[in-house]
Amino acid sequence: MAMSLIWTVMVAASIVCGLLTGRGAEVAAAAMEGAGAAVELCLSMAGVLCLWMGVMEIMRRSGLAQGLSRLLRPVLRRLYPDFAGDGKVMDTISANVSANLLGLGNAATPLGIEAARLMARRTPGVASDALCMLVVCNTASIQLIPTTVASVRAGAGCAAPFDILPAVWLASAISVTVGILAVKLFSRLWPRPGTAAVRPGRGV
């Protein structure tokens, strides 16, 4: 709702400024040009995203996705110790991380929402430490292949859309590390009521 309001105000302001400055025709031409460029960008992005979504589906059917999930399990168990014994939650989180590694945010988002929904069953109405960790890790995810960003660059005419890999690896690694440390720190400084119920044997 807020974004719709912001975009409406921006468009209205552009039209009013164009009319007041006598550049209404230029504003209309720019709007048409921008609409055409947006369609071209969406089509180019769709091709790249379909390619990597197909790769992910092949990984799932061939068992590679399950293998990647098993490799991620030791790390995820340390990040989400309260759910280490919950296979369904861990499988969903593993799939979410796998999609993020491939830069497939469109595929990772519903998996993250499903994992959050399963986690929230234990502490209804309260964002547990594990749920906060999930949100942070899903938002500041490590990407091995920045598919979405590369598709945008390719659609904009970039000759080497994947030359940003080193910068993406470094930036995402730093963001995830800082996010995890922040969650750990704040969970100790400001424990939330209700989280102790899902952490047997541990103090809040």
Image (cartoon, helix red, strand yellow):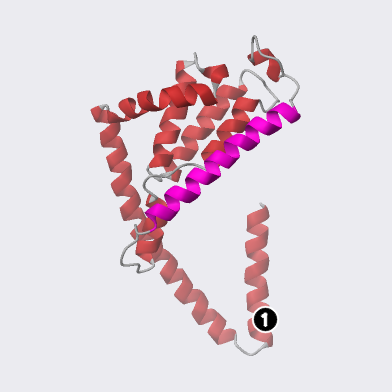
Q: Is residue 166 magenta?
A: yes
Magenta stretch: dominant secondary structure: helix
**Side of 130 relative to 173 (left or right):** right
As helix, strand or loop, the secondary structure at mark 1 comes to: helix
Q: Nearer the viewer, residue 171 or 195?
A: 171
**Side of 11 relative to 77 (left or right):** right
Q: Is residue 151 above or below residue 56?
A: below
Q: Magenta span covers which residues?
A: 164-190
Can you name the residue that lies furthest to the bottom here?
A: 22
Graded by Cα atoms within 10 Å as few (under 14), some (14 to 19) or many (20 or more), the crowding at tag 1 reads: some
Q: Which residue is mark 1?
A: 17
For image coordinates 69% across by 28% down, the residue present is: 187
For image coordinates 39% across by 58% down, the residue present is: 164
**Side of 143 relative to 159 (left or right):** right
For image coordinates 31% across by 63% down, the residue present is: 160
**Side of 117 relative to 47 (left or right):** right
Residue type at mark 1 is: Cys
Q: Is residue 113 above or below residue 175?
A: above
